[in-house]
Amino acid sequence: MNLVRNHLLISIDAGTIMAGARAVEEALIKEIAKQGLSDEISVLETGNIGVTGQGVIIVIYPEGIYYANVTVDDIPQLVEEHLLKGRPLKKLILSEVPKQYIIKKEKTGLFKEQPRIVLKNSGIINPESIDEYIASGGYEAVAKAFTMKPEVVIEEVKHSGLVGRGGAGFLTGMKWDFARKAPGDPKYFICNADEGEPGTFKDRLILEGDPHKLIEGMIIGGYSVGANYGFVYIRGEYALSIERLEKAIAQAREYGLLGDNILECGFSFDINVMKGAGAYVCGEETALIESMEGKRGHPRYKPPFPVTEGFRGKPTVVNNVETLANVPEIIVHGALWFRGYGTEKSPGTKVFTIIGHVSTPGLIEAEMGTTLRDIIFEYAGGVKGGKRFKGALVGGAAGAFVGPDMLDVPMDFANLKEYAAVLGSGAILVMDEDTDIVGMLKSVLHFFKHESCGHCVPCRLGTAQLSKIIDRIAASKGTKEDVDTMLKISDVMRDTSFCPLGQSLYLPISSSLKYFKDEIMARVQ
Amino acid sequence: MYRELILKKFKPSVENLLYILHDLQDNNPQKYVAPEDIRVSADYLNVPYSFVHSVAGFYTMFSLKPRGRNIIRLCESPPCHLMGSESLLEYLKGTLKINVGETTKDGMFTLELTSCLGICGVAPAMMLNEEMHGNLTPERVDDILNKRREEI
């Protein structure tokens, strides 16, 4: 390996590709060669660096300088100024680098200060290189897990208190235990990457930024429950995630980390990628399984739960991407270490995507129990344009509207109680003072009308009725009774719908009325 | 003929149905799952025509109606709504002179709505075929559409 003077990290993810990152990368490599610097400067691809909506992002180490909105035309000047003359190019430097984005090299071990567990490698290593993943300590957890009995691995995960990051908040170790003890052969281990909750893209960033972490988590999971077949169900729209993951799987097979007799320890496991076709309801685990079997994505009756009767009628674990990305770190460092982060009842960290009217939209990993105020004002630079904070939609369409009084409530499963489900998605959509709440609610209800699978009556008819009512209110033709009916319909849906999709409309409707009733009532006669 | 070649890529198991439909639709000149596509898949997998039809009708990425050469899928979920997707929809309808679900007379564009595309950091966003586009304004939309028109 050559000793190089500077490392340039260029973020290649769905957002930056859109802004022309591939062309910039090509121009950069050409320009560096032209200036005869190819031996001194290395250009590395990485995943999302934590900044979105700022065009092509390049970070230059060891200085740790972030450049944003870089175009092909900027390249000659950037190379000449920074790399040849050693003068940072001021006009492109990212003006507001929120504190979590600055991961100083010398501090990467200090998780307490920069609590990165899930996103440890994201934006640092090249996601398309298994060697870099291994060099950063990757696949150490698999090797360690293989020295432990499967039951002991499960105990460790149970002790860590890791709960599913998909939304339901179930203890991961318990789920694995049930599947291990369930009779049936073969068993299946599925990763749910059908991320569809509006505003949520954390799983995409993990898949694009550090796909090997997911693979490692799945191998450990498969080993624990005794499953030899793994599947990742990814939504069809995530083209780059599918490409990166398939590449990573091929590399892992080549290195003997997937396939027969992994690391010559007698355990065999392989992973296949399955592509969805656009259905929000397939995020529900039984609907996902139906879809994997080539059918319409209708949810199944529970019980039996997938842990006893899942894919092809066999015991099946379904875990979210973020959940599995936590597993290798827990195995390497131990349950106690993991419990050092977050709160007692909700240990660990949570990945949030913070979007809408904020100065610097992006993704962050914060300890469980961090307040909304810290996330919005400390990490995301507060409300854009210095406007007043009106509220936020937390947890996507199936989430809750919150007002300023929720800003200081610690965000964890225990504290959010009835709002706990919203934590899974981690989407925080910030609204400034000019936001029209009726319009937002309309968008939420239209979403559900579009995504209801039509399987059960309360949801199929309820979503259609709610959509009609909110259209009336938005056109200022609604009545007071309409508002009451809306709440009543969603309440009935909560009690009678077949799956969580129909049950979840009550939350956005009731919470919007709790915080913004005056505004909604002002629109009706 | 091309249909047979596509089918042969997959084992005749119903678990491959979504893959088969994706592939058939991508290769159909009118970018949709045609009755003939449904028939050959049903025969190949040995399941009823109605079964394949109901699956194709369930998922938003499949269309049972012929579409244009380019498919625009504008996101209408809350994050994009907050950042102004509604006015963009009006703009797209006006400039293409079509409604949602319709195709322009020259067969160039079909306009569709979609749920969250997962690129909310750059809302409002849309997909043009396989490409994602964000931070949209009417001017950006014009650029994207014009570029597409020139490429063909």
Image (cartoon, helix red, strand yellow):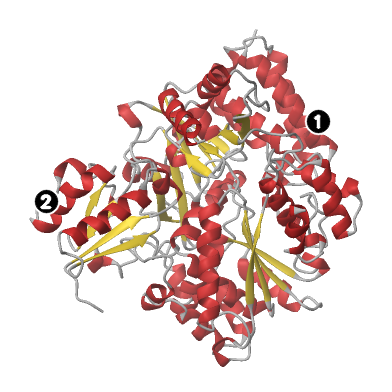
**From this viewpoint, which residue is outermost toward the top?**
A525
Assess disc 1: are there few (<14), some (14-19) or many (≥20) residues with their C-alpha within 10 Å of its C-alpha: some
Which x, y percent locates residue A23? 34, 49
Which x, y percent locates residue A27? 28, 52
Q: Is residue A83 left or right of residue B74?
A: left
Q: Would you identify the image quadrant in which residue A262 lies?
A: bottom right
Q: Would you identify the image quadrant in which residue A463 lies?
A: top right
Whether residue A50 can be seen here:
no
Assess disc 2: are there few (<14), some (14-19) or many (≥20) residues with their C-alpha within 10 Å of its C-alpha: some
In three-dimensional space, the C-alpha distance between marks 2 and 1, rounded to whole angstroms, equals: 63 Å
Q: Residue at x 62, y 12 (%)?
A: A475
Q: Which residue is mark 1?
A: A461
Q: Is residue A429 left or right of residue A37?
A: right
Which x, y percent locates residue A131? 40, 76
Q: Which residue is mark 2?
A: A81
Q: Is residue B111 left or right of residue A32?
A: right
On what subunit does the disc labeled 1 rest?
A
In the depicted structure, whether residue A203 falls above or below residue A471: below
Q: Mark 2 is on which residue type?
A: Glu
Q: Residue at x 63, y 91 (%)?
A: A266
